[in-house]
Image (tube, rainbow, N blue to C red):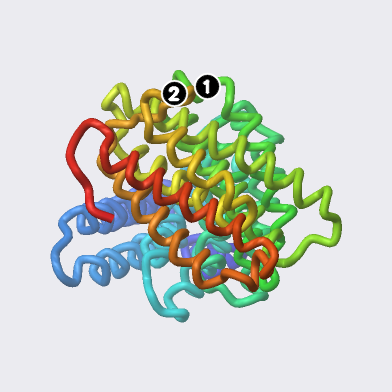
Amino acid sequence: MPPNEESPLEGKTTLSASEENSGSDALLKAAQTHMQQGIDLLSTGKEGAAQEALENFDKAIAAAQQLPWQTNEKYRWLLAACWMNRGELLSNADDGAALAEAVRSFDEAIPHLESLPHDKEAQYHGTLVMAWMSRSHVLRTLANPDALTEALLSLGRAEEVRKTGPASNDVGLRASIMINRAALQLEFTPPNALESLQEADALIELTSPDEDKQPMAAELGLKARHLFCRAVDTLMQAGPEDPAQAEEWLMRTTDRIEEALQLAARWREQNETPAFEKLQVEFFRFGCHLYLVSQPHFLAEFVLDVLDAERASPMHADSKELRQAGLEMLAGANQALKQRGPATFGAQRMDRLVEIIQSLDAAAEKVQNLPGQVLVA
C-alpha cells in the first residue's frame, strides 16, 4: 500500500483501544520477524535465498504498512527499514526490471526517512544519506544516459542532506560521496573529465592529513589519485587546446603517481593492507603508460626510480609484482616505439629514437639483475 494512503486499521473505528493495540502488536511482530528472516536468509548463501528473502521483505512491508506509521515514529522507521532492505537486495540483481524495483524501493523509503526527526536520532539522518547514495548506485548500474544524470543528482541530494544534520561531520561519509561522484563523472558520454579531476583533487585534500594514520583514509586517497589519473588521461586523449594546460596536467599527474606509490609502499611495509600492493602496481603501470605517450625519454628513469633501491626514491624494490610489471612495461614500450618509429620522431630524429630504445634495454637489464628472484619479461 502506498505510504500516503489510509491504512486498513485506521478505517476500523469500531475497534476498542485494547483491540487496536493487540492488532498493532501482531503486525509489528510480523513485520519484524519477516524482515529478520529475510536478513538471515541472505547470510546463508544457499540457492534461492535471495528470492526467499525478497518474499520476506515484501511480507514485512505489507505488515508494516498496516501499522499507524503516520503517527508513530517507531513504525515509520520500521517501514523505511523494510523498504531499504528490499532495495539493497534488489541492487545486486543483473536485470533492468529488478534494478528498477530497487530504485522504487529507495523512492518509497526516502519520504519516510525525510519525515523522521533527524535531530532526535542520528541514525535517521545517516540512513537518509545512504538511501540517496544507494539510489545513485543502482541508477549508475543501469548506465543509460538518463539514469546516469539521475544518479549524479541523487549524489547531490546525499551531499545536501549530509551537510544539514548529525552526519555533517562524518568525513568518511563525505569522502564516500565524493569518490562516487568523481567516478560517475567519467561514465558519461562524453566523460565529464574536468569535473572528475576537480572532485578527485578535493578528495585528496580531504584525506591527505590522515592517510598515514588511517587505512580507510589511505585507501580513499589512493582511489582519488587513481581517478585523477584517469581523468587526465581522458582529457589528454581528447586533445587539449591549450598546450600549457596539458603540460600542467602531466606534471600534476606525475606528482599524484609519485604520492600514490609512496603512500602504498608505506602501508605495504606494515603488512596490514596487502590490497594496497595491487593499487601500487596499477599506479606504476599508469606512470609507465603516461611517460610512454608523453615523455618516452624519461620512461627508463621512472622505472629505475621505482625499482632500484640505490636510486634517490626507492619504492619497494623487493616487490616481485612491481618488478614484473616494470619488465613488461619496458618490453611493451620498446616494441611500441619501434612500431611508431618515423611517424612519431620523424626521419631526422631517428637517432633520438635509438637512444630511447637503448635506455629501455639498459633499464630492463638493470631490473633483471637487481637482487632477488630473476624475472622474465
Q: Is residue 145 above or below residue 155?
A: below
- The kind of secondary structure element at disc 1 is helix
Q: Residue at x 57, y 29 (%)?
A: 207
Q: How many marks?
A: 2
**Residue carrying label 2:** 214
**Residue carrying label 1:** 210
Residues at marks 2 and 1, CA–CA distance in whole angstroms? 6 Å
Q: Residue at x 36, y 25 (%)?
A: 309
Q: Where does the image place residue 53, in percent across and percent down from the top left?
A: 27, 64
Q: Tell which of 40 and 46 is nearer to you.
A: 46
The answer to whether residue 133 of the structure is visible from this angle is no
Q: Tell which of 208 and 320 is nearer to you.
A: 320
Q: Residue at x 36, y 62 (%)?
A: 89
Q: Is residue 273 above or below residue 329?
A: above
Q: Where does the image place residue 332, in percent across and percent down from the top left?
A: 42, 61
Q: Tell which of 117 and 41 is nearer to you.
A: 41
The answer to whether residue 56 of the structure is visible from this angle is yes
- The kind of secondary structure element at disc 2 is loop
Q: Are marks 2 and 1 in contact (CB under 8 Å)?
A: yes
Amino acid type of the residue tagged 1 in the rendering: Asp
Q: Where does the image place residue 176, in percent across and percent down from the top left?
A: 54, 42
- Residue neighbourhood size for the residue with mark 2, other residues' Cα within 10 Å, grouped as few (<14), some (14–19), many (≥20): few
Q: Is residue 161 left or right of residue 256?
A: right
Q: Is residue 256 left or right of residue 51?
A: right
Q: Where does the image place residue 46, in percent across and percent down from the top left?
A: 14, 64
Q: Is residue 336 above or below residue 217?
A: below
Q: Residue at x 48, y 44 (%)?
A: 300
- Residue neighbourhood size for the residue with mark 1, other residues' Cα within 10 Å, grouped as few (<14), some (14–19), many (≥20): few
Amino acid type of the residue tagged 2 in the rendering: Gln
